Image (cartoon, rainbow, N blue to C red):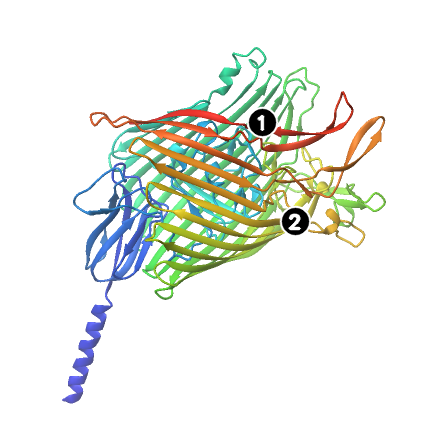
Amino acid sequence: MISKKISLLCLLLSCLFATAQEKFTLSGTISDSKSNETLIGVNLFIPELKTGVTTNEYGFYSITIPKGNYNIRISYMGYQTLEELIQLSQNTKTNFKLLTNENTLKEVIITDTKTKTDIRKPEMSVNKLSISAIKRMPVVLGEVDVLKSILLLPGVTNAGEGASGFNVRGGGADQNLILLDEATIFNSSHVFGFFSVFNPDAIKDLKLYKGGIPARFGGRASSVLDIYQKDGSSKEFHANGGIGLISSRLLIEGPLVKDRGSFLIGGRSSYAHLFMKLSKDQKNNAAYFYDLNTKISYKLNPNNNLYLSGYFGRDVFSLANSFTNIYGNSTLNLRWNHLFSDKLFSNLSLIYSDYYYGLDLDFVGFQWDSGIKNYNIKYDFKNYISDRFKLNYGLNAIYYDFNPGTIKPSSTTSGINYSQLDKKYAFEPALYINADQELTAKFSVSYGLRYSLFYRLGQSNLNVYANNNPVTFNTNMQIYEKATPIGTQTFQKNEVLKSYNYWEPRFSLAYQFNEKQSIKASYNRMVQYLQLISNTSSPTPLDVWTPSDSFIKPQIADQVALGYFNNFANENYSLEVETFYKKVQNRIDYIDGADLIANNALEQVILNGRMRSFGLEVMLKKNEGRLNGWVSYTLSKSQQQTPGRTALESGINNGQWYNSAYDKTHNLAITSSFLYNDKWTFGTNFSLQTGQPVTYPNGQYQYLGITIPSYGLRNKNRLPAYHHLDISATLTPRKNNNRNWKNEWVFSIYNLYNRKNAAAINFRQNSETRANEAVKTSIFGMVPAVSYNFKF
C-alpha cells in the first residue's frame, strides 16, 4: 500500500514537473504600422524571464518559453517602444506593428526608444546606423551619404578627401565586403569617390561588422558592410525625394496587392554637368552619375514570401569629346523566404552582380572594356531551437567571370588592333554553421565554423618561369625586375589550375556583470580569395580584381578583440571600449615601377608579404534628449612587411615593417544632433585624422639636363593632418493636417573654417626658377549647400 502511494506521488510530481516545464513557441514578424515594412534587428524582450530575441533580416522572430502570461517589450530605433501582455498556452503566431516616434497609440503603453548599447549579446565590433540619423549629418554639397557616415565610427577611416572606399582597422578598401540586398558591390562610389552608390531613401538597414564576424559571411579579410533595401509599402502609395545643388532623387512605393505585395522604385541623378555647358571652356566636358533601385515583394501565404530586388548605376566622365569613361555596378537578386515551422526559417537567394569599366579614347582610336561578374546561390537556415539556443547554417556557391581588359578600335580608321587580355574564371563554394547560446543568465556565447573552397579555373595561357619565380632580384642594382617566361601552359576554361580550402573558425562571448555593464571578446578568421590590383591607397575605377592562383595566394586574416560596454546615467549614455589585434598573411605589394594597366602577367610585378594592425577604440554615445550623438576616438597602427625571399634579397624597405597606406595613428570623430524645437534641428560633425602615409623624395640627380628625384623608404613620410568641421540646420515647416505633404529644407556648410586638406603633394621643378618645389593638391574648401526634401 505504501509503495502504491509512493508511486502515485512520484507520478503526480512528474506530471507537475512536466507541466512546469511545458514550453511553447511565440513567433511572427514585426513591421512598420504605416507601410507593413518589416524591421530588422528589433528587440523583443521578456522581463519576467530576462530573455529575448531580435528579428532577422526579414523581420521574423521566434522564441520558445515556458507556458504563462508575460509582458512583451518591443523596442527599435526611431520607433515607440511597445508593451503588450501575452497569454502563452500554445504555439502562437503574433505579428506586431510599431509606430514611429511621431505617432501615438492609446491602447498600449508607449515609451521612447533609447539607442543604448546591447550588453547582453556576444555580438561585438558591430555598428548599426539608422537612416534617420544618417540624414541628420552634414555632408558635402548637401548630398546624404551612407559611406561618409560610417567614417564617423571608431576604427573606420577614409583614404583622403574625395577618395573612394573606406578602411577598417587598418585594412585596405578592397578587404571590405559590401553587400546590397546580399549582392556584392565592387565599387561603392560615384564620381571617383565624392558620393556613394547608396540612395538613402531606398535603404532600410545598415550594419558594419568590424570583427566577431558571423560565419555566414566570408570572402573578405577586414569587414562586412551589410545593407538592405526597403521592401516598399503594401498599404498605400507614397513618394519622397529631394532636390539639391548637384543632384536630385525620387522614390515611389506602393501596394501591388494590398497587404500582400509591394513595389519600390527609386532613381537618382546628378546634373552638375549641365552647368558646364554654360561655360565656353567646359561645354564639351561632362561628369555625372545616375542610379536606379528597384524591389518587388509578394507574400504568397503566411509561410512563403518572394522578393526581387535590383540596382543599376553608372558614372559618366567625358573630356572634350575625346575621352569618355563609363563605369558602374549592376545587381539582381531573387529571394524566397520559407517558414518550415515556427522554429525553422529559410532563405534561398539567386544573385547576379556585375561591375563594368569602360574607357573610350577617341584621340587614340581605341575602346577599353573590363569588369567582373559573379553568379551566387545562397541557402540559409535559422533554427530557433529554444530561447537560449539558436542555430544558423547554410551554404553558398559563387562563380566568377573576370575580364581584365578588352581593347578594340573605335573606328575603321583606327590603327589599334583588337586585343583581349586572358579572361579568368573561378568558383568559390562554402558551408557554414553558427550557434548562439546563453549558458547562464550572465554568460552567452556565439561560435561557428565556415569551410570555404576556391578553384581557380583555366585561362588560355599561363606563363611558366624558371624556379617558378615570376619576379627576379638584380643583386647589382638591388632592385626587383620582371622575370622572362621560359614557356607557357594552355588550360581550358573549366580546368582547375589551382585550388585552396580553409577552415574559418569564429567565436565571441559576453559576460554581463550587472544590468549595465559587460565585457566581450571575439576571434575570427577570414579568407579572401580575390585581390584588387591597385597601387593607390584609394580604389579607382581602373583597378582590376583578380583571383588567387599559383602565384597570388589567398589573404588569411586572424583577428582578436576584447571590449568593455557600459550603459550608465539611467541608460542615457553608453560607453564602448575595444582593443583589437589583426594579422593578415599573403598581403601583396608591388615592385618599384610596377605597371598594372593592361598587364597580362601581373605575377611579374607582385611580391607576397604580410600585414598587421592593432589599436584601441573608444566610443561615448548620448542616447536620449534633445542633444544626442557620439564621440569616437581610435589609437591604432597598421603595418606591412615584405621581406626578401632569400638572404640576398632586400625585400621592401629592407624587409622591415613599414606603414601601410591605411595607417592613421589618431582618428577622432564627433557628431551631434540638437532638436531646438519642432521646426529646427541642428547637426555638427568634426573629423580629425593623422595624415596618410606617403613617400617623399630624399634626393635628386641630373640626367640630360633634367632634375630627377630619388625616393626614400616606402611610406616613411606623411601628408599633413586631415580635419574639418561641418554644420547643418534642418527646417521642418509645421504640417498642414489637411495635406499629406511633408517637406524640409536642409542648409549645410561642409568644412566651415575652409581647411585646405591635402589630397596629395607632388614634387616638381619650377619651370621659371628651376628650383624644386612641393605642390599641394586640395579638393574642397568651404562648401555651402541647400537641399529640399519632400514626402507624400
At x 38% / y 34%, what residue is drawn? Answer: 682
What amino acid is found at the position of numbered circle 1 in the picture? Answer: Gly
The disc label shown at residue 640, or none = 2
Q: Nearer the viewer, mark 1 or mark 2?
A: 2
Q: Mark 2 or mark 1, which is nearer the start of the sequence?
A: 1
Q: Nearer the viewer, residue 521 or 17?
A: 521
Residue in the image at 23% along x and 50% along y: 83
**Disc 1 to disc 2, how far (Cα)?**
33 Å
Q: Secondary structure at mark 1?
A: strand
Q: Nearer the viewer, residue 503 or 779?
A: 779
Relative placement, left or right, of 117 versus 79 is right
Image quadrant where one finds the N terminus: bottom left
Which of the two residues, 182 or 682, is positioned nearer the viewer here?
682
- Type of amino acid under label 2: Gln
Say if 751 sits above or below 33 in the image.
above
Q: Which mark is residue 358?
A: 1
Residue 342: % across, % down: 29, 54
Q: Residue furthest bottom?
A: 1
Q: Position of residue 319 (x, y in %)?
A: 60, 19
Q: Position of residue 176 (x, y in %)?
A: 53, 44
The kind of secondary structure element at disc 2 is strand
